[in-house]
Image (cartoon, rainbow, N blue to C red):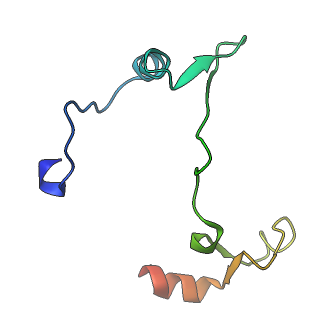
Amino acid sequence: MKKLGIKVDRAYWNMNLAMLTESAIKNGEGQLTDTGALIVSTGTFAGRPPKDRFIVKDDITKDPVWWGSIDSLWHLLILMAYTGG
């Protein structure tokens, strides 16, 4: 992490489900529902800004996606060229 310029006091990786759940609850980042599922609040600024989202319009997505002004319409060939795929 130091090579990436990320400074942290402690880092965890490859935690199992029980460890992740316990950590989230202990740190006040989540709570258990009455069914035992972990629920978290991601806050106001969660997710990607709409302009950073790219959806390929094809036979699968043309009807279920609401193609509004904030959706970036990409065709498969353009997306492949953009991502190098």
Instruction: Tell me residue 46's x, y (percent).
Output: 58, 50
Task: Please identify the quarter of the rendering in which residue 67 is found.
Answer: bottom right
Q: Is residue 17 left or right of residue 55?
A: left
| Total labels drawn | 0
Q: Nearer the viewer, residue 45 or 38?
A: 45
Instruction: Tell me residue 43's x, y (percent).
Output: 60, 41
Q: Residue at x 12, y 54 (%)?
A: 3
Q: Residue at x 29, y 33 (%)?
A: 13
Residue 58 vertical placement versus 4 (above, below)? below
Instruction: Tell me residue 17's x, y (percent).
Output: 46, 22
Residue 15 vertical placement versus 34 (above, below)? below
Q: Is residue 42 left or right of residue 28?
A: right
Farthest residue in the left direction? Answer: 3
Farthest residue in the right direction? Answer: 63
Task: Please identify the quarter of the rendering in which residue 85 is found.
Answer: bottom left
Residue 42 vertical placement versus 18 (above, below)? below
Q: Is residue 51 left or right of residue 67?
A: left
Instruction: Tell me residue 51's x, y (percent).
Output: 62, 74
Q: Residue at x 57, y 71 (%)?
A: 52
Q: Nearer the viewer, residue 33 or 5?
A: 5
Q: Nearer the viewer, residue 66 or 29?
A: 29
